[in-house]
Amino acid sequence: MGNVLVVAEHLHGKFPKTTLVGLQAGKQAATLAGGRCLAAVLGKGVDALAAGLAEYGVGVIAVDGAPYEHYVADAYTAAIAEIVKQKDVEVVIGAATAVGKDLLPRVAARLGGGMASDVTAIVDARTFKRPMYAGNAIATIQIDSAPRVVSVRTTAFDAAPKDAQKGTVEKLAVTPDAAHAQARFVEFAETKSDRPVLTEARIVCSGGRGLKNGENFTVYLEPLCDALGAAMGASRAAVDAGFVPNDLQVGQTGKVVAPALYIAVGISGAIQHLAGMKDSKVIVAINKDAEAPIFQIADYGLVADLFKAVPELTEEVKKLKGA
C-alpha cells in the first residue's frame, strides 16, 4: 500500500480550481491504493497556503524556501522527487495545466516511473483511462513501474470539498543540488483580464475564423462576453490567423473547458476544437453554414450571419439583465 502525492499549484496566494480537481483525483486514487493522500505545496512563505489545504483532509508537505518562490522546473522536480522517496509515494498526481504538463514528465523521468497523461478516470492504483484520437477513443492503460505519475484532465473530476477532519502539515527542507539548479526565474508575463479565467468560467464564448479578423473579436464577441459575464475563447484557426493570443485557444492543443454554457461563434467544429469543449453542459452554435460539424454536438444551433445575430443576442441579454 503506497501513498498518493498531489502537486498543489497556487497563484497569488490562492489555489485555483484545477488544484482542487487534482486533489479530488488524488483522494480517489489513495482510496483505491489503500494509502494516504498527501499534497505538496512549494513556494516561499507558504504557511497560510499549507494550513488552508489541510482543511481538505489531506496530509500537507510544505517545502518553503527561496528556490521555490517561483515555478522553476528543475527545482520543483528535485523537491517532488525527494518527497516521493521520503514518503513512500506510489502515485504522483497533478492537473494537466501548463505547469503540470511541464513538471510531471520531468518527475517521471527523474524517478524512472511510468506516466499517464490527461487521465479522465482512475480504475485502480495501476490502471487509468485517457482519451485518444481527439477523444474519439478511450484507452485503458496500466502502468507497472512505480512510482506512477499521472496528470488528470481538469474537466474530468469535481473539485474537492473541504473535509470535516483537517489534515496535518509537515515542513520539509529540500535544497536542490547544483546539478539541478541551473535554471533561474527571470519574469512571469501574466495576462490580466477582468473576465473570468477561461478554465474556471461558468460561461465561455468562443470565436472562430468566421469572425474574419481580430478587430471583430473586439467589436462583436467581447460585448457578448461582458453582457453574459463570460470568459472569451477562440478556435485554433483564429489563433493561428493571429486574431487573438494563443492563451485563449480552446481545443486539443489549447485549453480544455467544460462550462455550464459554451457559445461557439463562427466556429466550424474541427475535431481539434471539439476535443476541448464537447463536455460542456450546454453548447450553443452560431454559424451561417448549416452543414458545419459544430451543429452535430450543439444542443442549440442558429444558422445565421453572426455579424447580425451576435449584436442582437447581446442586446437581448442586456435587456434581460436590466429587467
Image (spheres, rainbow, N blue to C red):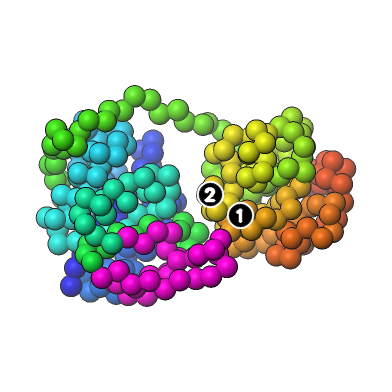
Vertical relation: 33 (above or below) 286: below
On whether residue 131 falls in the magenta region, the answer is yes
Residue 253 is labelled as: 2
Vertical relation: 271 (above or below) 46: below
Vertical relation: 245 (above or below) 286: above
Question: Could you tell me residue 303's position as x and y percent?
Answer: 85, 55
Alpha-carbon neighbours of circle 1 within 10 Å: few (<14), some, or many (≥20)? some
Over which residues does the magenta segment extend?
Answer: 115-144
Nearest the camera: 68 or 111?
111
Q: Is residue 126 left or right of residue 253?
A: left
Question: Could you tell me residue 167's position as x and y percent?
Answer: 23, 58
Q: Which residue is mark 1?
A: 272
The answer to whether any part of residue 50 appears in the image is: no
Q: What's the residue type where badge 1 is placed? A: Gln
Q: Is residue 188 left or right of residue 259?
A: left
Q: Secondary structure at mark 2?
A: loop
